[in-house]
Image (spheres, grey):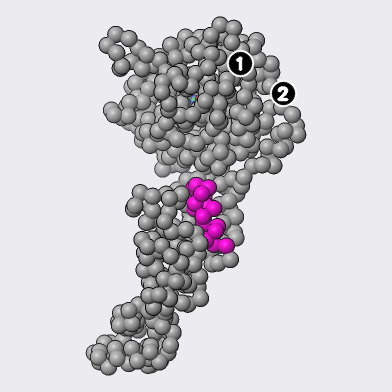
Amino acid sequence: MQTSAARIADKKDWIKGATGDWEVVIGLEVHAQVLAKSKLFSGASAEFGGEPNAHVSLVDAAMPGMLPVINRFCVEQAVKTGLGLKAEINRRSVFDRKNYFYPDLPQGYQISQYKQPVVGEGVVQIDLDGGKTVEVGIERLHLEQDAGKSLHDQHPSMSFVDLNRSGCALMEIVSKPDMRSADEAKAYVTKLRQIMRYLGTCNGNMDQGSLRADINVSVRRPGGEFGTRCEIKNVNSIRFMGQAVDYEARRQIGILEDGGSIDQETRLYDARKGETRSMRSKEEAHDYRYFPDPDLLPLELDEAWISRIEASLPELPDEKTARFVKDYGLSAYDAAVLVAERASADFFEEVAKGRDGKTAANWVINELFGRLNKEGKTIETTPVSAAQLGGIVDLIGNGTISGKIAKDVFEIAWTEGGSPADIVEKRGLRQVTDTGAIEKAVDDIIAANPDKVEQVKAKPTMLGWFVGQVMKTTGGKANPQAVSDTLKAKLGL
Ligand code: ADP
Ligand code: MG
């Protein structure tokens, strides 16, 4: 595994300019909404949606004299996420006021963490094409308040504000500048989202704004000094993140090759036009006049409490993938497909328990996932349960049905329900292993095709044709191995 800031992009990721090769350097600030019932400093509901301003307490509306009270569960979620990112948990952290005016931030400042965040350095392993993995460093994770939403298109001369989201807990997860291509940035966000969904600390719903990223992009000559970065604000789709990186890298290369220089600035990605444009020049930390929030005491975490959280962590994606490869003999690729969501990994394990892992994986991935995708269903709404799929794998395993008949059984289980064993019994789908019946079918085919019999003696690969014919006349119920053995014996192959 390659690590860290010194890493140079793979040659395939170098960008050809007019004056030579360039490399893109990316660091991400991901904002993840904490999965919690109530907000970071108030008891108002943190649920998505609702009538505008239905989830607003006096604290969220910043009424004079209101005092914030920390939501212990949100801290627990942040610590859990930090542990999932293999990060240092800071026993003492501090909430600061970050001062800026924004109509949907009624306090006039955001409560955030600056110099002393709750979580320090960590690491995320990202998975790239061809089984390659790369480590991306985590700089920090801090807790902060989300802002509300201004609505400018509801009235000809007025803007409205919806404070439902104002004060919801966000985790800002800052990466080191360790990514070297759009694909790596996409893989990083995908992995981060997966880890948090496993932990249950963020639902990762990007279309609801629960996960969004500011993308810092700069370019340099391969292996050279870091260049000046631009920050692309608030991108809320993984596909757009990739597009924004590629566009921005090209733009910067164009400027540098024309002899210009990059101004550090904040930009916006316009998905419709596929380009980034300037929003404002980059503000510096001192512009915000950060200072410790006098309404809140420093956050002191108890050792035993952290240990309890650690003990409650579920098995995480990387470990699960490794275990699936080892225990079930799966390819790393198949294991990763199954582990993508916790629910599908659990489903697979239920099917695979006490059965052949590879057959189980094949049925879950190819038959079940294929069908779910086609019908717009998910593992939560699947009509074929793990017990049913396991039943099919059993019937294949003990030779009751062939793989081909198994597909028919799956189809019946999908549309009509029922246990696979009953389906096979009721419909007489049991595989024919009776050698007499198979011999008779083989004899018939041989007698009817003297020309093919001549050919197969010169070209043994023709045997497949004979097997196919016998399978056809037996309605797919003959045991293919028995058919092949009988044919070989009778044809003298
Ligand atoms: P700010 O609040 O000023 O944006 P942060 O420290 O919160 O600063 O975030 C800086 C982000 O920019 C980090 O994700 C970091 O990895 C990234 N970054 C820093 N330098 C570069 C660079 N030269 N090119 C690309 N990304 C960078
Ligand atoms: Mg920033």
x then y, percent, for residue 186: 44, 38
Q: Is residue 362 visible?
A: no
Image height check: is 451 above or below 328?
below
The residue beneath circle 2 is 300
Residue segment shown in magenta: 338-353
Q: Looking at the picture, tell me which residue is in the foreground, 58 or 487.
A: 58
Question: From the viewer's perspective, is 86 left or right of 194?
Answer: right
Residue at numbered disc 1:
68
The C terminus lies in quadrant? bottom left
Query: At 37% from the left edge and 14% from the top edge, which residue is drawn?
Result: 160
Queried whether the magenta region covers residue 344, the answer comes back as: yes
For the N terminus, the image quarter is top right
Question: Residue flagged by tag 1: what amino acid is it?
Answer: Pro
> In the picture shown, does residue 233 fall above or below 411?
above
Return the x and y of residue 482 as percentages of the image width and height: 43, 84
Magenta stretch holds residue 25: no
Q: Residue drawn 37% across and 22% down?
A: 268
User: Is residue 77 in sight in this rendering?
Assistant: yes
307 horizontally vs 253: left or right: right
Location of residue 370 in the rendering, given as x and y in whole percent from the top left corner: 38, 56
Camera-near label (2 vs 1) is: 1
Q: Residue lying furthest top in this view?
A: 64
Mark 1 closeness class: few <14, some 14–19, many ≥20 residues within 10 Å = some
Mark nearer the N terminus (2 vs 1): 1
- Rendered residue at 67%/32% (across/down): 88
Query: Marks 2 and 1, Cα distance to the nearest angstrom?
Result: 17 Å
Secondary structure type for disc 1:
loop
**Amino acid type, mark 2:** Glu
- Is disc 2 surrounded by few (<14), some (14 to 19) or many (20+) residues within 10 Å? few
Please name the predominant secondary structure of the magenta segment in the image: helix
User: Which residue is depicted at the point 56% across and 46% down?
Assistant: 317
